[in-house]
Amino acid sequence: MYERLRILASPLFILFLVLLIINDFFLKAAFQNTFTGKLSDFSGLFIFPIFWSAIFPKWKSFIFIATAVLFIFWKSEYSSVIIHWMRPYFNTGRTVDLSDLIALPIILFAWFYMERKPSYSIGPVLMTRLSTYFIGIVAIFAFCATTQPRYLQSFDQPQYVLLKNPTLKGLDSYDGFEFHIKDSLLAVKINYLGISRPVRNDD
């Protein structure tokens, strides 16, 4: 088992793991821009298939292919039904953005990186072994908890925004909003908003 997991102590795996954690815990909350969103996609798509392929090497091809397919599905509007079902239990949310698919080539890069069988020794053998297991535990934590808590601001009275001559597409892909089109007007009902801090009584 240890020999298979040694790739988790390789420099690039550690780099992308650290980037994923720092980005999702700090950078996203601080900047909330396109770069931080794409950085999570690139980092996650690199370490996720490598991690599970190290544990289940016989399933390597399936894991890499499944990672790409599931990522495409998750980023599409077809996953909205699953997200609506999961939200009460896992507070899950996402915005459809097909430009996120630009991160898919990193999966191919991860495949070739694994083929090189890189490893890294951190001091004595015992320390390297313990470090590898520790990095594996951190990776599991990163997969499960890299997104900060998503607080929802709801409203006692319905909140509406009227837009004239709207050009929005894929209106069913925006969580927390209801869209009603009449002639050249788009009425947007805001059911709740995602915010970065707990809701206070005076909000």
Image (tube, rainbow, N blue to C red):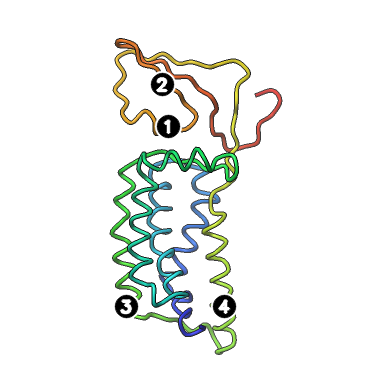
Residue 44 rendering spot, x and y as whole percentages: 43, 58
Label 2 vs label 3, nearer the camera? 2
Residue 49 rendering spot, x and y as whole percentages: 40, 66
Instruction: Name the residue at 36% across, 48% down.
Output: 73
At label 4, counting other C-alpha atoms closer than 10 Å, the crowd grade (few under 14, some 14-19, many 20 or more) is some
Q: Quadrant of residue 152?
A: top right
Q: Which numbered disc, 2 or 3, marks the residue that appears first in the sequence?
A: 3
Give the SS element for disc 1.
loop
Q: Which numbered disc, 1 or 2, marks the residue that appears first in the sequence?
A: 1
Q: Which numbered disc, 3 or 1, marks the residue that appears first in the sequence?
A: 3
Label 2 vs label 4, nearer the camera? 2
Q: Callout 1, which amino acid?
A: Tyr
Q: Nearer the viewer, residue 53 or 36?
A: 53
Q: CA distance from mark 3 to mark 1?
A: 39 Å
- Verify CB contact (< 8 Å) between mark 1 and mark 2: yes
Q: CA distance from mark 2 to mark 4?
A: 51 Å
Residue indicated by mark 1: 174
- Verify CB contact (< 8 Å) between mark 2 and mark 3: no
Residue indicated by mark 4: 131
At label 2, counting other C-alpha atoms closer than 10 Å, the crowd grade (few under 14, some 14-19, many 20 or more) is some
Label 3 vs label 4, nearer the camera? 3
Residue 147 rendering spot, x and y as whole percentages: 54, 49
Residue indicated by mark 2: 179
Give the SS element for disc 2.
strand
* Residue 119 in the figure: left or right of residue 108: right
Give the SS element for disc 4.
helix
